[in-house]
Amino acid sequence: MHHCKHLSNLAFYYDYRQNIELFDKFVTWVLSSRDDSCSLLNLVIENQFSGELIDPRVFDSVIEYAVLHNVRNLKLDVFSPIVTFESLSLIFCSQSLTSLKLCIRRTSSPVVVLPKSFDLPALKSLRLNCVGFAASGNECAEPFSNCRVLNTLVLKCFSLHDDARVLWISNSSLSSLKISHLLQKQVWEVRLSTPKLSSFTIKGFACDQLSTTCNLSFLEEVNIFHRYLWETSSISTLLKWLKVLANVKILTLTSVIILMILPELSNMYSRTPQPPCFVRLELLKVDKQVPIKISDKEVTRVVDFLLQNSPSAKVDIS
């Protein structure tokens, strides 16, 4: 009993080798044994693809306990093919959370749709996986604007719901953004209102439109990583992305991106697209470590096209 009384870090891991009833009883016992006057700094709950579910009532009691005890760092990575946990709404109005990692994996059932707005005034780092965002008005999902000190945002395997066509990432403090892998094919837009954004990574992801309401004057690095051609969008869409990100200092592209652009430059019957004007670009990096065959000559041709308006930029092909 005394071992649990003053614990500030709790981690509960469940897999198929454990008895689910005993696991639930153990979690309940740990919480009931703690001294309620002690804050909870870190909480982890994981049961990845176990085949059996943590009792949702136990899960909800843990989350409620954590929020009431001012949890600061919370990681939830659970497999829930059917159950929607009622306590999730509590997480997104926590006044103490500084870091949140949330992944709720499902099979055939829909993803868990998160609240339309997050009221997390202390949150600095947010990582969301396998979740959905709902429209809050004008076909826009805008969940992040009330996270006033948010620095890092990672979105993976997400989707839009309730007629949302635009994911509006509006945040005045955000510095680092990573977006990867849609859960469904949609015709939609990612809109950036992130004046302090310095690092932006796009991986295995395509949208019809990338736009910004500010000039992204703090943008230091952009990484566009695609490993397979079927992950990519059209050349016109890609060039529009690059024009939006034209203030970048260091740009990294994979050879798949280069291979996308090459046919447009080789087609004598098509009008050659206009390259972006990178006003601050210092270095263009081409990552060839992907399963796509492309010659150095072909890479150089595309690089020369992209850097027409940036003659002082250096090039690193590896």
Image: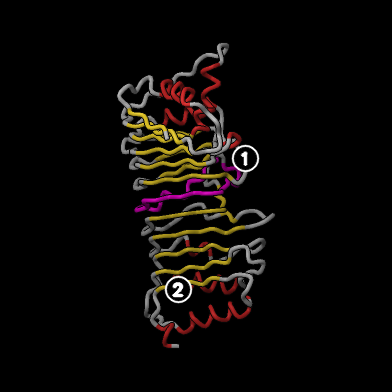
Q: Is residue 88 magenta?
A: no
The residue type indicated by label 2 comes to Leu
Who's the residue at 52% across and 68% down the image? 45
Check the image and name the residue furthest to the top: 269
Which residue, as the protein is rendered here, is positioned at the far bottom? 1
**What residue does disc 2 label?**
10
Disc 2 crowd rating (10 Å Cα; few below 14, some 14-19, many 20+) is some
Q: Is residue 193 above or below residue 247?
A: below
- Dot 1: few (<14), some (14–19), or many (≥20) neighbours within 10 Å? few
The answer to whether residue 261 is left or right of residue 109 is: left
Q: Position of residue 251 (x, y in %)?
A: 39, 34
Q: Of the residues tagged 1 and 2, which is closer to the observer?
A: 2
Disc 1 marks a residue whose amino acid type is Lys
Q: Which mark is residue 18?
A: none
Give the magenta-colored segment's residue range.
139-164
Identify which residue is drawn at 55% across, 46% down.
135
Looking at the rendered structure, which numbered label has been put on residue 185?
1
Residue lying at 45% horizontally and 73% vertically, measured from the top left: 10
